[in-house]
Amino acid sequence: MSEKLSQVAVTAVTDVTINKNSHLAAVPSTAAAKKGVTLPTEEQRPCYRCYPEAFKVNGKRYDAGLYFHDSIDDGRSKRSCDHWLCASLEVVAMASDTGHSYSKLLHFVDAEDQQREFLLPMQMLKGQAEDLKGAFLDMGLSLELKRFHLLRDYINKAKPKRRIKLAQKTGWADEHSFLLPDVDIGTGDYVLAHNPFGSADYGIAGTMQDWQQQVAAYAQDNVWLVVAIGSALAGPLLLKLELSNGGFHVYGDSSIGKSTISRVACSVWGAPDKFIKTWLATLNGQEGVAASRNDTLLVLDEIGESDPAEVGKIIYQLGNGQGKIRADKLGGVRPVQTWRLMLLSNGEHPIEAVLQQARQQLKAGQQVRLTSISALRQHGCFDTLHAFTRGAELADHLNQACNQHYGHLGTAFVRRLVQQNTSELKKEFAGFLQQFDAGHGKGNRIAKRFAVIAFAAELAKRWQLLPWPQQHALTLCLQLYAEWQASQPQGSHEDQAIITGFIDYITRYSDTRFSALSDADHRASPRTGFFEFINSQCVYYVTSTGLKDMFPSMDSKRVVRALFQAGLYYQTGPKERALVKRIHGKPVKVHALCLPNDAQ
């Protein structure tokens, strides 16, 4: 039988219509049976054929599906055998990722009579292909289990003419193709790898019109809702405009609507309950989550659930767009996960306060990647309530509407975006950026973030995807940017963080970690230094070890320079900022510091 099977012809009664813009999606089966179906002749056997509908031949009824047509010769006569293998199934395309990860794209009809697509990695055919058998059963494909080896053979030998490229993650596959788990927007030359992590988080429900009327309309005149929707749309623009990852951390008291802001943003791409993720994850765990949001939006809920010691590392990792480099079993290097995305986070406290719980200082690189901005507006997180009387009522309405209508705007936005000229987009964005008075350094990157959010929302308005007035999103983004600028202290962020950290440390530990200089028996454990009053002013003599204890993650020279420039040194040594002071009969190298006048 094996020799005979090696020459099996793979044929089909009808061609399967391929929807190039839909992958892994369940759609109604529309295949129609051919009239006058005939079975293969003896000369054509053995072969495979797929029949989309039930049929009769010589009065005998045959169920729809894939058949293996064979014949048996017992030496006296030949007898035809027609073996039903499974419901209607065909191999319609071959996919690969630059010569690796070969897969075949299958179309089949499931138990609900829905036509489905399944990207089958060729490695699933190895051995007895038990994993493939389980996958088929899980997807509702009716099988003849005792003849599964014939189905495996059919899939293996099929040579479809269509060739497509395999992509490993969502987002841009090339300049004109954008991939989501259920659709290739653009050329149709790509398919997303089978079941990537997070693929189930994307989805569509309800209608675009209802989302516009029940969600977007209530976002009008509400700064944070407009920014949330614009952030969700900005993700696909990052690559085209050559912008870096980043986003906003929205903080404020509980029950003022922060989670509603996040859920509205999620509704652009999928079901909020699935699309929103939590800060309660390890650094490694956030890698997979971020990669699943490539070129879209990552929403992290409630930073208070995180490990404060991990937050700073996670911010850098998400902002840098690259996971860890890891070795494989053979000593080589595994493929590194990468991503481009917009980030939206929320919590009761700003990032700086969260880091302080782990005795860490907020660094400029962290602030520029995830910028903390207060959520508080006139009515909790809202500027206007429209027809509602309380912020809680508007929040309830938006949450309910987002659960019923979601996933339409992101897909519709990208369908228009793939048609645009990248050079023209860059020129237009440059005009937007000029209005944000970008400046240099961190201010430039944060200004670009506000600008791309406004730009994305204004494009959506131009394409009639959002029901807001023209320039409405730009106006509100400029307003929030101005408010953020006004809240920023003058000078270097690192300097301000050091000064604030020093004041906070003294306020918290002056009674427990500093010994009175005049009392040799006054012991503090652990001891940061000593103190004494000079002309009614308290001077703190901080030891070199104590200074490192105050700022464990910062360079001591950087700390000393900031404290000196802020005028917090009461006295300095002849050659350096520290001086040698005789304390309880022993020379000790200390930094003589005092609080600023407004903090004493």
Image (cartoon, rainbow, N blue to C red):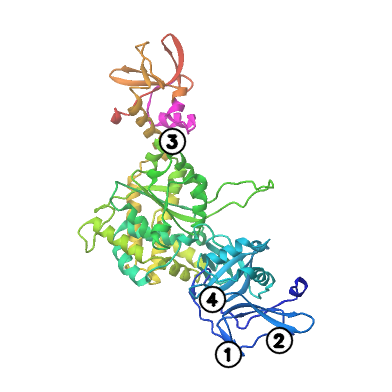
Q: Quadrant of residue 591?
A: top left
Residue at mark 2 to residue at mark 1: CA–CA distance: 18 Å
Instruction: Inspect the image, locate mark 2, and give the three-letter code of the amino acid beneath it.
Output: Thr
Instruction: Inspect the image, locate mark 1, and give the three-letter code of the amino acid beneath it.
Output: Lys
Q: Which residue is mark 4?
A: 19
| Residue 492 visible somewhere in the drawing | no
Quadrant of the drawing holding the N terminus: bottom right
> Residue at horizontal 35%, vertical 26%?
509
Q: Which residue is mark 1?
A: 35
Q: Is residue 184 above or below residue 488?
A: below
- Marks 1 and 3, the one that precedes in the sequence: 1
Q: Which residue is mark 2?
A: 41
Magenta residues, as a range? 547-572
In-image side of 529 versus 184 (left or right)? left
Foreground disc of the pair 1, 3: 1
Q: Which residue is mark 3?
A: 360
